[in-house]
Amino acid sequence: GIKAEIKAPDWGTLTALLDKYTEIPMFLMGKGSPTGDLDLTLNLTIKTGGRMNHFSYSNPKVDKLIEQQQGITDPKKRFQVLYEIQKIVYEECPAVVLFYEDQVFATRANVQGVEIYPYEFIGFHHASKR
C-alpha cells in the first residue's frame, strides 16, 4: 500500500508547488482539451518543459515527434505520428489517467440551436427559444 497525507491547497499554492517538481511526489489533477486537438495537451503536459508537465517527463524523441506532427497536413500521416507519441508515453507511463469525465448537457424542449463541440465548448451564438 501507499501511505499518504491528503492535502488540498488552493490552486495558486498547488501550481507553485508543482512547478518546483520536488515538493509534491504524487498528485491528482484534471485536464480538459479546450481545442479538441491533441497538440495542445501534448505541448502542455508531455513536451519537455511543458507548462503542465508537473511530473518532469522528458523524452527527446517524443519532443521531436510533437514538433513534427505540427507541420503535417495529411490527417492520416498526422494520426500515425500522434499514435507513435501516445504509444511511447503509454509505455513509459509518466502519469496515470484515472478516468475521463463525461461531458453532460441538457436543454429545455423549447430551446434550439445550441451547439455542443467535442472540446468542452458549448456554443450559444445560434441559440433561440421557440
Image: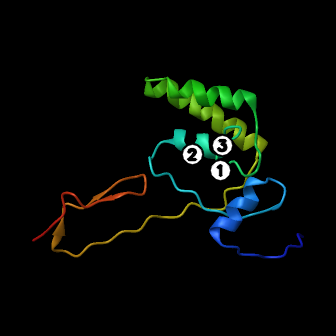
Q: Please indicate whether residue 43 sits to the left or right of residue 95 in the image.
A: left
The x and y percentages for residue 124 are 25, 61
The x and y percentages for residue 96 are 72, 55
Of the numbered discs 1 and 2, the one sitting upstream in the chain is 2
The x and y percentages for residue 3 are 89, 73
Compute the Cα span from label 1 to label 2. Answer: 9 Å
Whether pointer 1 and pointer 2 mark residues with C-beta atoms closer than 8 Å, the reply is no
Q: What's the amino acid at mark 2?
A: Thr
Asked which quadrant contains residue 29, the reply is bottom right
Q: Which mark is residue 50?
A: 3
Compute the Cα span from label 1 to label 3. Answer: 6 Å
Q: Which mark is residue 41?
A: 2
Of the numbered discs 2 and 3, the one sitting upstream in the chain is 2
Q: Please indicate whether residue 127 sits to the left or right of residue 39 in the image.
A: left
Q: Please indicate whether residue 35 sits to the left or right of residue 9 in the image.
A: left
Residue for point 21% across, 57% down:
125
Mark 2 lies on a secondary structure that is helix
Asked which quadrant contains residue 63, the reply is top right
